[in-house]
Image (cartoon, rainbow, N blue to C red):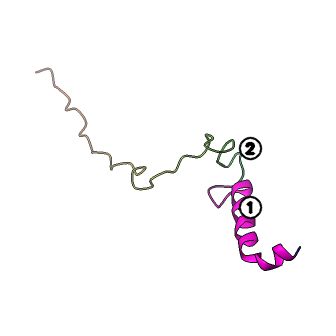
Amino acid sequence: MQWILDNWLIVLLFGGMAAMHLFGHGHGGHSGHGNGGHGGGCGGGGMKHRNPVADQQPEPVPVAPPEEKTGV
């Protein structure tokens, strides 16, 4: 018990790292709830880190309707 009191800062840091590992750190919530969590465990699939600039779609180019041909 004395060791914990003497090294409370180290215990706090390790506890924080364990909590971040187990409960996530703000990347979309928990997996399995349908909102894009990490997936499964260390290195698991799930949410990919997205680039919002690359996700933007370019403006569509307006295309003129084809001209009607008259049969003269």
Taking the magenta stretch, the answer to whether it contains residue 27 is yes
Left or right side of 46 for 18: right
Residue 71 lies, with reference to residue 30, above or below; the image says above
Residue 24 in picture, x, y percent from top left: 68, 57
Where residue 71 sits, quadrant-wise, is top left
Q: Quarter of the image containing the N terminus?
A: bottom right
Left or right side of 5 for 12: left
What's under tag 1, amino acid-wise? Answer: Ala
Q: Which tag, 1 or 2, sits closer to the chain's start?
A: 1
Circle 2 residue = 32
Circle 2 SS class: loop
Tell me the magenta residue range.
Answer: 2-29
Say few, some or many: other residues with alpha carbon within 10 Å of mark 1 (under 14 / 14 to 19 / 20 or more). Answer: few
Depth check, mark 1 against mark 2: the one in front is 1
Circle 1 residue = 19
Magenta stretch: dominant SS? helix
In this view of the protein, which residue sits in the foreground, 40 or 66? 40
Residue 17 in picture, x, y percent from top left: 69, 62
| Residue at the limit of the structure toward the front, as seen here | 2
| Residue at the limit of the structure toward the bottom, as seen here | 6
| Residue at the limit of the structure toward the top, as seen here | 71
What's under tag 2, amino acid-wise? Answer: Gly
